[in-house]
Amino acid sequence: MPRPHFRPAPRPGPKPGSSEAGAYWLYGLHPARAALANPRRKIRRAVLTEKAQAELGPVLSARHLDNVTVAVPDAVARLVPPAAVHQGVALLCESLPDLDLDDALAGAAAPRLVAVLDQVTDPHNEGAILRSAAAFGLAAVIVQDRHAPPESGVLAKSASGALDLVPRVSVVNIARALEELGRLGFWRIALSADGESSLREAATPGDMALVLGAEGAGLRRLVRERCDTAAYIPMNGAMESLNVSNAAAIAFYELRREMPS
């Protein structure tokens, strides 16, 4: 029997009557540089200061954008959220095309490491996780469509360019995604304070999936049951838990140490 093809969750449609339907303002030098260098990213418009234009240099020229406006910093600031650190650049971008799990993993070299986020809804937390995922060479980050932050300028800025570097796969059901990862040969590790062993002890040399839950609620029962083991990060008793993005960074480092280079 052929293996089922795991499809991504459909993205909600644009709001009726919006002149910028399906697009959002991405801002900051690192996110903009990564977006401009990403051939999958469709950019409708660029508004930037002369300084930002010089900073982006060749990567901006290589895109051959038709709609580029050079503006003063205040004009850029009016396009982005209040107090956002835009660094003189705002790109009106369409959301990245949907990826399915097979396509996201296809180009990754073995052994592969992926992160699965179970209802991590804060864009700053997910952005920081994406940034760590890029730093430690993760093959993909898997999120649930209805319980993850939408793609936005806040998410892109928090990820500091990693949103355009790490494949982000949105799925309808996390438990089924974990079943699919199991069929693909991934060893699935739930990160939990009451895990059966330390993260180092739980690691294997092959493909691994690290499953992280939302702060407070933690992993849902059905999600945890789809994992092969549960592991914890050893910590001093003075602190019971870490922010999920901090825990992710430590866990990515620890698992990468156990994987052959």
Image (tube, helix red, strand yellow):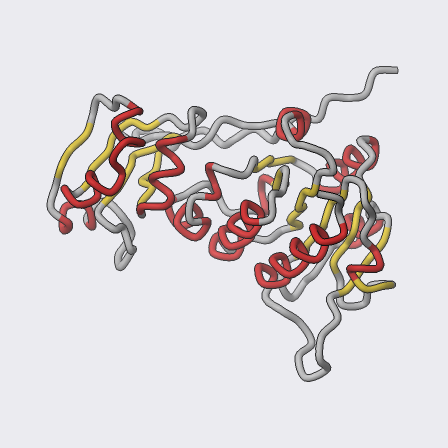
| x, y percent for residue 34 | 40, 38
Whether residue 1 is situated above or below residue 132 in the rendered picture: above
- Specify whether 233 is left or right of 66: right
Is any atom of residue 193 visible in this view? yes
| x, y percent for residue 128 | 51, 55
Location of the N terminus by quadrant is top right
Residue at x-position 20% and y-position 37%: 47
Between residues 26 and 29, which one lies in front from this camera angle? 29
Residue that lies at the very extreme toward the bottom in this rendered image: 238
Between residues 228 and 18, which one lies in front from this camera angle? 228
Residue at x-position 62% and y-position 29%: 104
Residue at x-position 64% and y-position 49%: 117
Number of marks:
0
Residue 152: image quadrant is: top left
| x, y percent for residue 62 | 30, 24
| x, y percent for residue 188 | 80, 46
- Specify whether 97 is left or right of 116: left
Whether residue 246 is situated above or below residue 45 in the rendered picture: below
Between residues 244 and 199, which one lies in front from this camera angle? 199
Residue 199: image quadrant is: bottom right
Location of the C terminus by quadrant is top right
Is any atom of residue 143 visible in this view? no
Residue at x-position 77% and y-position 40%: 207
- Specify whether 14 is left or right of 20: right
Residue that lies at the very extreme toward the front in this rendered image: 261
Residue that lies at the very extreme toward the left in this rendered image: 72
- Specify whether 141 is left or right of 79: right
